[in-house]
Amino acid sequence: MKKVSLLIGITLFILLPTLHVHGEEKTSDSRDLTEGSKSAILMEQDTGEILMDRNIHEQLPPASMTKVMTLLLIMEELDKGNIKLNEKVRVSENASSMGGSQVFLEAGEEMSIENLIKGIAVASGNDASVAMAERIAGSEEAFVKKMNEKVKQLNLKDTKFKNSSGLPAKDHYSTAHDMAVISKELLKYENVTEYTSIYEDYLRKGTDNEFWLVNTNRLVKFYPGVDGLKTGFTNEAKYCLTATAKKDNMRVITVVMGAETPKERNKMVSNMLDYAFNHYQTEKLYDKGQTITELELLKSETSQVDIVTSQSVSILSKKGEEIDHVKSSYTIDDNIELPLEKGTQVGVLTLNDGEDVVSEIPLVTNEHIDRASYYTLFKRSLNKLAKYN
């Protein structure tokens, strides 16, 4: 890896060691806000810092929070251009037969991918989830394989999926920690909240079989800043919620699993959000997709390639903490093989506080990069000859 120091020295707040909140501590700032849940976590989005935790690695049924992973794979396919929002998907008998929460798709019906996403994100439609799984992978079984491959890519140790919807299944489990990490990855696709923040909408609007969508996540309407992500409930899982909210420059993710009632679940999430926004702040350094450097790849079709941040980059601090100094540097892989898909990691952006690494962020390609054709290479050779003559 080649290491390059950026011409940037940033005076910013630095987070002290992560605060873990436990019920036995008596101060008002560290009271247990998740009493009554089986598992819970509060995470800051950009840095991934855990601000609060309860049994975060306990394997539990995630119910419809499973759809956070389903939405992640959908957003990846949209980003790659493999599917389009206006594309129509024909609903199979299998997809239309799903029980539980559904948007009542009919076998043979055609619906746009955008509306199927709404069906998943707003109404938690199991039928819509399976329809999209079949469109992307050919079958739900093949899609589930992709889900578990993504679990491995994210280095998650306590998650295994058996379906795309979260319907009860043996050996289908996750944890509060893993659901937060999957949500963090999903939120890199910032347009996903355009769907998860919808409180009510309609499918087939104006037709005889118009269907009213109402968000299963009531906090979207009743807690300012909440714009996602996904509820879950089965008799075994109890009431679950993965939620996200943004205030000022800071976005946080909460997960509650195993609450006894939806009211208790929503109260826990609201309390954690209050805690985060009252006690922490972030300073943004880079936006997602911001160019860090340009590479000259002589054997690529486009000789100059922008290398960009894979996500927004921030520094997290407790409000009122002392100021320290942060420096940034980046490294680029020595051997880059073509072709490269859009979003391929080719380097790392590192934030340092002295000798301590504060954060490491993948640097990626901002477009698909093909090998140069023989004609392009010939043309470049001629241009170089002309330059030196």
Image: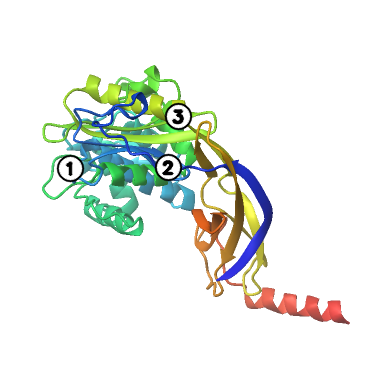
- Which residue corresponds to the image point at 40% horizontal and 24% vertical from the top-left? 274
x and y percentages locating residue 25 in the rendered image: 28, 31
Q: Secondary structure at mark 1?
A: loop
Residue matched to label 3: 279
* Left or right of 334 in this view: 223: left
Q: Nearer the viewer, residue 212 or 87?
A: 212
Q: Residues within 10 Å of mark 1 (few under 14, many from 20)?
A: many
- Which residue corresponds to the image point at 38% horizontal and 36% vertical from the top-left? 253
The CA distance from mark 2 to mark 3 is: 44 Å
Which of the image's four quarters has the C terminus?
bottom right
Query: Which of the numbered marks, if any, corresponds to residue 60?
Result: 1
* Left or right of 130 in this view: 342: right
Q: Secondary structure at mark 3?
A: helix
The amino acid at mark 3 is His
Q: Nearer the viewer, residue 107 or 260?
A: 260
Looking at the image, is mark 2 or mark 3 earlier in the sequence? 2
The CA distance from mark 3 to mark 1 is: 29 Å
The amino acid at mark 2 is Glu
Task: Establish if 149 lies above or below 286.
Answer: below
Task: Give the image's coloring scheme.
Answer: rainbow
Residue matched to label 2: 87
Q: Nearer the viewer, residue 229 or 359?
A: 359
The CA distance from mark 2 to mark 1 is: 36 Å
